Image (spheres, rainbow, N blue to C red):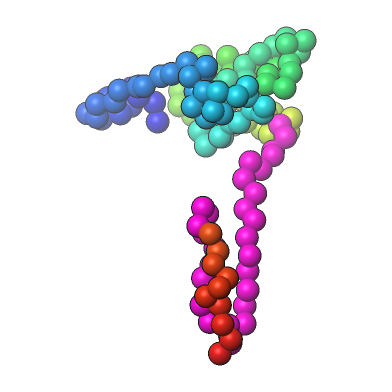
Amino acid sequence: MQIAQFTKAGATIKRNAISLAEYSKTIFGGRPQQFGVSIMSDPALFTQFSCTDKSKAGWHTYCSKQLTGLLIQADGAKSQAAYESLMKKAADVLQKDAYIVPILAKAGVGLWQPDLKGWHAPRIFVEQNFSDLSWK
């Protein structure tokens, strides 16, 4: 939802915008960014990919005349239905071009044996203590 929608509903929203440099420092610990991350949970978020000049495309930039054209049309849509239809088309363009790369790989240990006692499923950042394991 847009902030205006929350405000219209009576909610008070304060936007806490930070610079890309501050965000990168917070997320990447001051190291240079090594990959681009985008969470596509809201169709409005992929407007960050609005770019028509393919010569500017690179590791952190995606450029598509078709996508940008659809985003511009959506921005001028006369109804919510027209907006949503154009954003869906834009999302389809991006989906065909985009690489989906998982950013979390969970490694774990799993055991199943009814006679094994003391086993607990591993948790993130909690060391697995194998000394408590015993056979029935």
Q: Is residue 58 visible?
A: yes
Q: Is residue 64 visible?
A: no
19 horizontally vs 72: left or right: left
Q: The N terminus is located in which quarter?
A: top left
116 horizontally vs 2: left or right: right
Is residue 83 within the magenta segment? Answer: no
78 horizontally vs 32: left or right: left
For image coordinates 35% across by 22% down, the residue present is: 15
Figure label count: 0
Q: Nearer the viewer, residue 131 or 12?
A: 131
For image coordinates 45% across by 23% down, the residue present is: 79
**Rendered view: 94 above or below 110:** above
- Give the x, y percent position of residue 47: 56, 21
For image coordinates 54% across by 67% down, the residue present is: 129
- Residue at the farthest bottom position: 136
- Give the x, y percent position of residue 48: 58, 20
- Give the x, y percent position of residue 62: 69, 20
Principal SS element in the magenta part?
loop
- Residue at the farthest front position: 131
For image coordinates 56% across by 90% down, the residue present is: 136
Which range is magenta?
98-126
The image quadrant of residue 85 is top right
128 horizontally vs 16: left or right: right
Q: Nearer the viewer, residue 34 or 80?
A: 34
**Rendered view: 133 above or below 68:** below
- Give the x, y percent position of residue 39: 56, 34
Is residue 113 within the magenta segment? Answer: yes
- Residue at the farthest left position: 10
